[in-house]
Amino acid sequence: MKIVKPMLLEYQEKATTEDGTIFEPKYNGIRLLVGNDYSYTRHGTITTNRFPELLFSGTPVLLDGELIAPGTETPDDFEAVMSRFSGNKVQEIIYMAFDIITYKSEMITRYPLEERKALLTEVLANIDSPCINLVPYIHTEGEAVFNLMKENNMEGVVAKRLKTPYLIGKRTDYWKKIIAWSYHDCIISKVTFGPLTAQLTDIEGNYLGSVNIGFTKEVKDVLFSRTPPYACKVKSRGWTNTGKLRIPLIISIEKTLL
């Protein structure tokens, strides 16, 4: 088994309607590469024994996709899939395949996206596993797909340009993610350094999570120069099952102290 680094995505602020582009749901799970008798994460962690239900027979292939766990209020539950990753073997999983990297043990990354999609559909039709599914996609109508994902509490959409190859280990605008952010008014109750971390609460003092990434220069200047508490605006990828903001980022900080 040779570890292949997957193709990565650029970020796009808004969903658009684009000719020559397909749009897929952005699932909230673990990026996983799956071969007939092995699997591993985008960082190369071998997961074959953790997910035995993903093993299959037939034509030797390497698939790229997202491992998810079914949610009760959303199609995917990030905390549930992480529970399975950490050893909870009773947790149900589903592998959503969106690309194919090798076919009959040969690299097919040079094939354009639409040819890889056709071959992926054919390969999955011959895999007898209820745990391995095909990621759906729609041509052109990015805004409509994004709005549908937002209505279903999903993370967003991925836009992919047709006629493009699969670039091993590269981050490229051939693939772009558009996140369905949620926005919140919060309080920065505490700031610590090394690494820089801002603790968030609501107005009543209930802990909502912490921010330690994605600081703009303007936000950093305030965090280093002012003593909490003070109000801020935050965007996040929704909520965790325990009522915390998921991957919150500080957009701006109010000028006045509380």
Image (cartoon, rainbow, N blue to C red):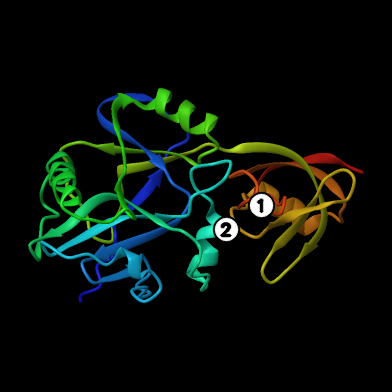
Quarter that holds the N terminus: bottom left
Residue occupying image coordinates x 50% and y 60%: 81
Residue carrying label 1: 241
Secondary structure beneath label 2: helix
Q: Is residue 14 visible?
A: no
Q: Quadrant of the C terminus?
A: top right
Q: Name which residue type carries label 2.
A: Glu
The three-letter amino acid code for the residue at tag 1 is Asn
Q: Nearer the viewer, residue 19 or 129?
A: 129
Query: Badge 1 local density, few (<14 within 10 Å), some, or many (20+)?
Result: few
Closer to the camera, 87 or 251? 87
Q: Position of residue 115 (x, y in %)?
A: 12, 42
User: Are the two marked residues, 2 and 1, in contact with CB atoms closer than 8 angstroms?
Assistant: yes
Question: At 36% across and 76% down in the image, what residue appears?
Answer: 49
Q: Quadrant of residue 41?
A: bottom left
User: Residue 132 appears at what percent x and percent y?
Assistant: 30, 54
Q: Is residue 133 left or right of residue 144?
A: left
Q: Is residue 43 above or below residue 12?
A: below
Left or right: 108, with 148 as reference point: left
Task: Give percent across and percent down for residue 42.
Answer: 36, 65
Q: Position of residue 76 (x, y in %)?
A: 49, 48
Up-down relation of residue 92 to residue 182 (above or below) = below
Mark 2 or 1 closer to N-term?
2
Residue that appears at 72% across and 56% down: 209
When the figure is inspected, residue 163 is found, relative to residue 9, above or below; the finding is above
Tag of residue 64? none
Q: CA distance from mark 2 to mark 1?
A: 7 Å
Q: Answer yes or no: is residue 80 visible.
A: yes
Q: Label 2 crowding class (10 Å Cα cut-off): few <14, some 14-19, many 20+?
A: some
Which residue is at 86% across, 54% downward?
228
Element type at mark 1: loop
The label on residue 79 is: 2
